[in-house]
Image (cartoon, grey):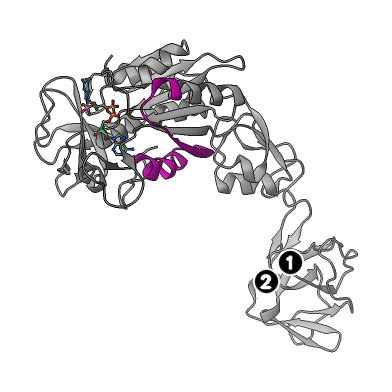
Amino acid sequence: MTLTQARHRAAALTALPPAQLRVPDAIGSVLVDPVHAQQDIPHVSTSAMDGWALAADPLPHPDGAPRWSLRPESPRSPAIRPAPLRPGEATEVLTGSPVPEGTHAVLRTEHGITAGSELQAISTSPDTAPQRNVRHAGAECRAQDQLIPAGVVLTPARAAVAAVAGHDHLRVIPRPRVQLLLTGAEVITRGTPAPGQVRDVFGLALPPMLREMGAGTVDSQRLGDDPEELAEALRQISATGAADLIITSGGTAHSRADALRPALQMLGAELEVDSVDMRPGHPVLLARLPRREGPLYLLGLPGNPLAGFSALSALGVPLLRALRGIDHGSRTPTLRRTAGAQLSGARRGTRLLPVRQGAQGVIPAGHSRSHMMRGLAEADALAIVPAAGIAPGEPVDCLPVPGQHQEGLAWDV
Ligand SMILES: Nc1nc2c(c(=O)[nH]1)N[C@H]1C(S)=C(S)[C@@H](COP(=O)(O)OP(=O)(O)OC[C@H]3O[C@@H](n4cnc5c(N)ncnc54)[C@H](O)[C@@H]3O)O[C@H]1N2
Ligand code: MOO
């Protein structure tokens, strides 16, 4: 299967079923329903300044300065709307508090001089013009107006709009709960590895990458290399329903030492993607585990560090987007850049090459063998390089690397 075919396959998976979530918990999820205003916003006309609400007709003012007779009240709770203004009257208001009926304008505190029960506006104040500093009822929206369309991600700002409109719960496609199963008896999580050991990269880097990709929760479990043990762990996760997606690391190859394929066979899993014609990361697989409540997907990342993270960028990103209901079945995000140097292809298939942005375009980040980590750490993205390579000045499509967003590079994810 080509990289493009595999990415389309991942992007075409069914989104998770919708759930009703509290607004703070719904942030980052895709809205199933549009959000409507439940009332006018603001629902009454309010003041935009601390000062005085002025009636339309000032008192007669022989010396030319407009004056009003001040009502003795001071603003109480913003919930209480003051009594209507009579001609020539003014009353104190606060920013955000309702203005009385008959308000012509609001004079800000700095532009008014009080003398006893009289208020005078300084002659240079613009605040006596009609409707100055008044926020009109319904200026932001009318009751039943659509504020946010369905199908978009609830960003923090959109959540705040929903809250302003009085919503406590929203129907969304919840963010996937991910269970990591990290295989390999040789993998250690602290200290310097002895011969035959490697220090873990996936348990460390995958959780923050996956959260950035929109995962709700990420739990980790470590296993050895035994297919029976792995199959049992998969059965458990399937039975408890504690995860929407399983991501494994290691054991994807076809040798006797590799546990993933035998474990999936024991469970009768179907392979949506069984190896991809890309280097590194070609043994990656995407499987569907049978389950009564609907399919449980498994993304199997190769154990070689750069291979595993390349597979995450290539298939994990469209997969997570599909489960979250983003751009369902259509666009998978890539970014078009210019090659700033010769980008050499692999001997066969597509090469995913760690690149960074140089002055003339993207250039190889170096240290990009399958078992290495340094190249990815230096990279802004993975260039998708065909076998023939890409010459300097030619366009090149790149995959964003989760967590590697560098300043100045607005990756479209
Ligand atoms: N006989 C074959 N050998 C290999 C094949 C093959 O098709 N036939 N494919 C090669 C390719 S390409 C890759 S990529 C790897 C895939 O490896 P696996 O997914 O089976 O992973 P492992 O064998 O378990 O580990 C490979 C390598 O990665 C290290 N590793 C594993 N987990 C971690 C971790 N959490 N942190 C850091 N490093 C890890 C592991 O120690 C191995 O060195 O297979 C090739 N071989
Ligand atoms: O996927 Mo392997 O990384 O080509 O070495």
For the magenta stretch, what is the residue range?
A: 201-229
Residue nearest the observer in this picture, 23 or 215: 215
Residue 332 or 278: which is nearer the viewer?
278
Q: Are marks 1 and 2 in contact (CB under 8 Å)?
A: yes
Q: Amino acid at mark 1?
A: Ala
- Secondary element type, mark 1: strand
Which element is circle 2 on? helix
Q: Quadrant of the N terminus?
A: top left
The circle drawn on residue 127 is: 2
Which residue carries the number 1 mark? 105
Residue 52 occupies quadrant = bottom right
Locate the C terminus by quadrant: top left
Q: Residues within 10 Å of mark 1 (few under 14, many from 20)?
A: many
- Quote the CA–CA distance across marks 1 and 2: 7 Å
> Hey, what amino acid is under mark 2?
Asp
The x and y percentages for residue 73 are 89, 76
Q: Residue at x 64, y 32 (%)?
A: 34
Query: Residue 313: where, in percent of width, then height?
Result: 33, 33
Q: Quadrant of ligand 1?
A: top left
Foreground pick, 109 / 193:
193
Tag shown at residue 52: none
